[in-house]
C-alpha cells in the first residue's frame, strides 16, 4: 500500500437528498474516488436505514479481487 492518502479535513460535496413516499434517500458523492462513485443511504418511515455503494465499472472490477 504505497499509495497513502492524506486526510485533508476538507469538506466533501453536499448530498443529493430525495424523497419517495415516506422514504428519504441521501446520495453522497465520494471524494477522492473517480466520478460516479456514490454512497446511498435510505431511511424509511419505520426507522430502518439501508446503505449501498455505487461505483463506475472500472473501479468495482479493480477492487473485486
Image (cartoon, helix red, strand yellow):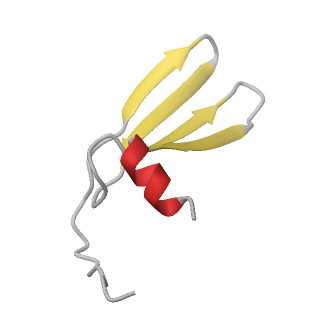
Q: Residue furthest top?
A: 21
- Of 26 and 63, nearer the camera is 63
Q: Quadrant of residue 12?
A: bottom left
Residue drawn at point x = 40 percent, y = 53 percent: 59
Relative height, residue 30 to residue 48 (above, below): below
Residue drawn at point x = 36 percent, y = 39 percent: 15
- Of 16 and 56, nearer the camera is 56
Position of the N terminus, as image quadrant, is bottom left
Q: Quadrant of residue 50?
A: top right
Relative height, residue 6 to residue 23 (above, below): below
Relative height, residue 8 to residue 65 (above, below): below
Q: Position of residue 65 (x, y in %)?
A: 57, 65
Q: Quadrant of residue 21?
A: top right
Q: Position of residue 4 (x, y in %)?
A: 31, 84
Q: Is residue 33 left or right of residue 8?
A: right
Residue drawn at point x = 43 percent, y = 36 percent: 27
Residue drawn at point x = 29 percent, y = 42 percent: 14
Number of callouts:
0
Q: Residue furthest bottom?
A: 2
- Of 11 and 58, nearer the camera is 58
Relative height, residue 1 to residue 41 (above, below): below
Q: Position of residue 19 (x, y in %)?
A: 51, 18
Amino acid at each position: 500500500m504505497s499509495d497513502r492518502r492524506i486526510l485533508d479535513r476538507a469538506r466533501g460535496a453536499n448530498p443529493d437528498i430525495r424523497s419517495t413516499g415516506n422514504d428519504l434517500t441521501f446520495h453522497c458523492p465520494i471524494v477522492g474516488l473517480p466520478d460516479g462513485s456514490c454512497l446511498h443511504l435510505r431511511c424509511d418511515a419505520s426507522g430502518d436505514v439501508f446503505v449501498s455503494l455505487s461505483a463506475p465499472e472500472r473501479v468495482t472490477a479493480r477492487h473485486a479481487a
